[in-house]
Structure formats: structure tokens, C-alpha cells
Image (cartoon, helix red, strand yellow):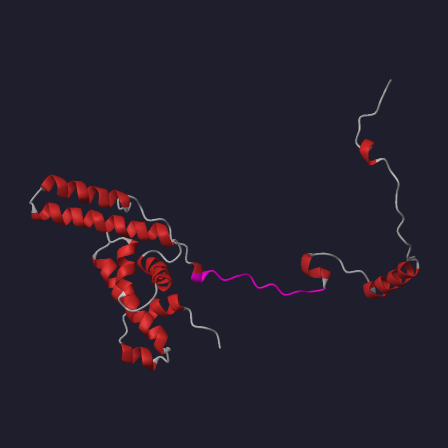
Amino acid sequence: MAKPNTLEICRVHLFDNRDDLLKQAIPEMLINRIIRMRSAYTLWLEHPRKKDAEIRDHLLTFGVNKTQAYEDIQLLKVLLGDMSETSKAFHRFKFNSMIMNAYDLAERKKDARSMVAAADKYAKYNQLDKEDNLKIPWEEIVPQRFEPSSDPQVIGIKPVADIQDRIKALKEKYMNDIEDIEYENVDFDEDNLFAEPNHE
């Protein structure tokens, strides 16, 4: 049986309770990891400015070693960011969180100018002022169905009568003419092989 992919399981079951995880026949060790990851995920989501070391220390409280904690952090970065661009998307997530925190602070201070500046940065960074790119409906694209055929008429070539018999006759003719020979060493002057000719 294939080993379950932790990342895929976390994507689907990160917020399931222990009973639901047990019903899914997920191993106890993986359930403990999901619960640990959920805790760190929530912490990082609420405090995006926390550094890797702080999240590592949080994970260590669950009784895992540092290596395991750093492996969890890599998965967390994928879960927090875009699945295909882990580090870049994670930093986008952190940047947006910092801008929103700046906006909230400006709003509490009733600083309209800073609120507008933070909102402007947020909109520009997320390209809200631009049209969305045309989304290609990949799921609707159906690949061409090709069926192999030995009939040349399919591509517009006139068939040759008794072609298989002619192929067989040519094979027999030329296969009988084959002669196996031993290779021979060729003596040549390697040093002067590519030398310019002397025209004196």
C-alpha cells in the first residue's frame, strides 16, 4: 500500500477533529502531525510576522525534534501559500498581512492618509487595478483521439497493391546480401589530423 501523502492529507483534513480523522483510517502518528500542523498553521495565520524559528519552537512543544519541526514548516509554507510556488506565495501572504496590519493600525489612529496609502499598496500589489487574465478552462479541453492505422488512404496516399508481399520480397532479397565483417583498426596520424595543409 502506498504511503499517504502528508501534504495532500493536510490539504483535505487539516481542520477535521480527531474522531473524523480516525474514521478516515488515518494512522495515529499522522493524526498527531495534522493536529500539530493545525496549531502552527493557525498561529502563523494570526501572526504572519513570526519567524521560522518561532514556529519551530512552537512545534517543539509537541515533543518532536528540530528536523521534524523544519519539515513541518516546509509543509506549512505550502499550505499558507500557493501550492505551486511555495516560497513566493508565502511571502505574498506575509506582505498582504503586514499591509492589512498597517491599515488596521491607521484606522485605530484615525489616520486617513495612512489608511489610503495602505489600501493603495494592497490594491497595487494584488493588481486589483488590472483586468483579470483570461482563465483557460483546462478541464474542458479534450485531447485529440488518434487511432493508429496501416491504411495510407487515411492521410490521402493511394495504396500500393500487394504492398505486404513486396515488402516481404525486398526483405528477403536484401537480408540475404548482408555480410558480417570484423572491424579493422585504421592507422592515422592523430597529431596532424586537423592541421592546416602546408602549401610551400
Residue found at x 57% / y 64%: 145
Main SS of the magenta part reads loop
In the rendered structure, the answer to whether residue 105 lies left or right of residue 175 reads left
Identify which residue, 161 or 109, lies in the foreground.
Answer: 109
Residue found at x 44% / y 59%: 138
Question: In x, y percent, where is residue 60?
Answer: 29, 64
Identify which residue, 77 or 133, lies in the foreground.
Answer: 77
Q: Is residue 1 magenta?
A: no
Question: In x, y percent, where is residue 12?
Answer: 34, 69
Identify which residue, 149 or 90, lies in the foreground.
Answer: 90
In the image, residue 22 sits, relative to residue 190, either above or below, namely below
Q: Is residue 149 magenta?
A: yes
In the image, residue 23 sits, relative to residue 51, either above or below, namely below
Question: In x, y percent, where is residue 64?
Answer: 33, 67
Question: In x, y percent, where is residue 102?
Answer: 16, 46
**Residue 13 in view of the camera:** no
Residue found at x 42% / y 69%: 5
In the rendered structure, the answer to whether residue 47 lies left or right of residue 81 reads left
The single residue placed furthest to the top in the displayed view is 200
In the image, residue 191 sits, relative to residue 198, either above or below, namely below
In the image, residue 48 sits, relative to residue 113, either above or below, namely below
Identify which residue, 127 or 190, lies in the foreground.
Answer: 190
Q: Which span of residues is magenta-colored? A: 139-150
Q: Which corner quadrant holds the C terminus?
A: top right
Residue found at x 37% / y 50%: 134
In the rendered structure, the answer to whether residue 93 lies left or right of residue 148 reads left
Q: Picture quarter containing residue 189?
A: top right
**Residue 122 in view of the camera:** yes
